[in-house]
Amino acid sequence: MTVAMLRYVLRRSTKSVTASSYFSSRGLSSAPAPERKVAILGAAGGIGQPLSLLMKLNPHVSRLALYDIAGTPGVAADVSHINTRSEVKGYAGDAELGEALEGSDVVVIPAGVPRKPGMTRDDLFKINAGIVKSLCEAIAVHCPKALVAMISNPVNSTVPIAAEVFKNKGVYDERRLFGVTTLDVVRAKTFYAGKANVNVAEVNVPVVGGHAGITILPLFSQATPQANLSDEQISALTRRTQDGGTEVVLAKAGKGSATLSMA
């Protein structure tokens, strides 16, 4: 998940963002910044740790709850030393999940096992589906109005699982549940800029579809700035974007998946 997307989600957690709150977040006003609590479920993992760091640096966050089955007190102690305004607390184990979620405005879920060489997203589903289900049941009880950003793979399946849990609990709101697929856009922009030899900061590539293999559809024909790329080059860029996750898994030789770029 990119910092830009999380800023968007955080801003949606209040009715509006006033000019005073904008300037106060940058130290240009004495007016207090809005209070927002963010909970990260899976904060001790490969995505969760860099994401925790980014959230501690985010001026829109006032309280940061870091939850995982183990290891989160250490992560919380580490990032809490950073000199930003948010208060950080770590929670570990099922008994502390409710406290971690209580009062949260935004919940980000990177929990679950990462993909390893030879694993498909269907393989991940068998493991991560149960994890996502139990976490969403807790969200429905302790912070049913929170904005929920789903990172746990396979996103194409974990988002519907979350939706069904919330529906069964009577708290479903389609405007408050997000599948995080920003990484596909990030990859498409990076790969396109390299092939077109243009400044990546100026590149825009629309990406539609899902977040698994051929369901990822980067629209390089609509990319800007335009470049005179052949059909073969566009096909190669499309395949690389679709297989970006596999590229990282193989490069890490089975010791991890895309974590830093995802955060």
Image (cartoon, rainbow, N blue to C red):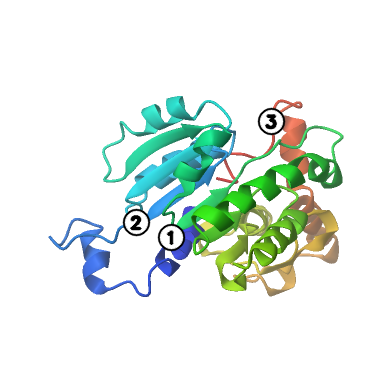
Label located before the other in sequence (3 or 1): 1
For the residue marked with disc 1, what is the amino acid? Answer: Arg
Label located before the other in sequence (2 or 3): 2
Say whether marks 1 and 2 touch (CB < 8 Å): yes
Front in this rendered view, residue 67 or 223: 67
Residue on which disc 2 sits: 60
Residue on which disc 1 sits: 7
Residue on which disc 3 sits: 256
Q: x and y percent of residue 34 in the render?
A: 28, 61
Q: x and y percent of residue 256 in the render?
A: 69, 30
Question: Label 3's element?
Answer: loop
Residue at horizontal 52 percent and vertical 41 percent from the top: 97
| Left or right relative to 101: residue 193 | right
The quarter of the rendered structure image containing the C terminus is top right
Q: x and y percent of residue 3 in the render?
A: 47, 53
Instruction: Answer few, some or many: residues within 10 Å of disc 3's Cα (few below 14, many 20 plus, some between 14 and 19).
Output: some
Comparing marks 2 and 3, which lies closer to the viewer? 2
Question: Label 2's element?
Answer: loop
Residue at horizontal 69 percent and vertical 42 percent from the top: 131
Front in this rendered view, residue 94 or 204: 94
For the residue marked with disc 3, what is the amino acid? Answer: Gly
Residue 173 occupies quadrant = bottom right
Label located before the other in sequence (1 or 2): 1
Front in this rendered view, residue 262 or 142: 142
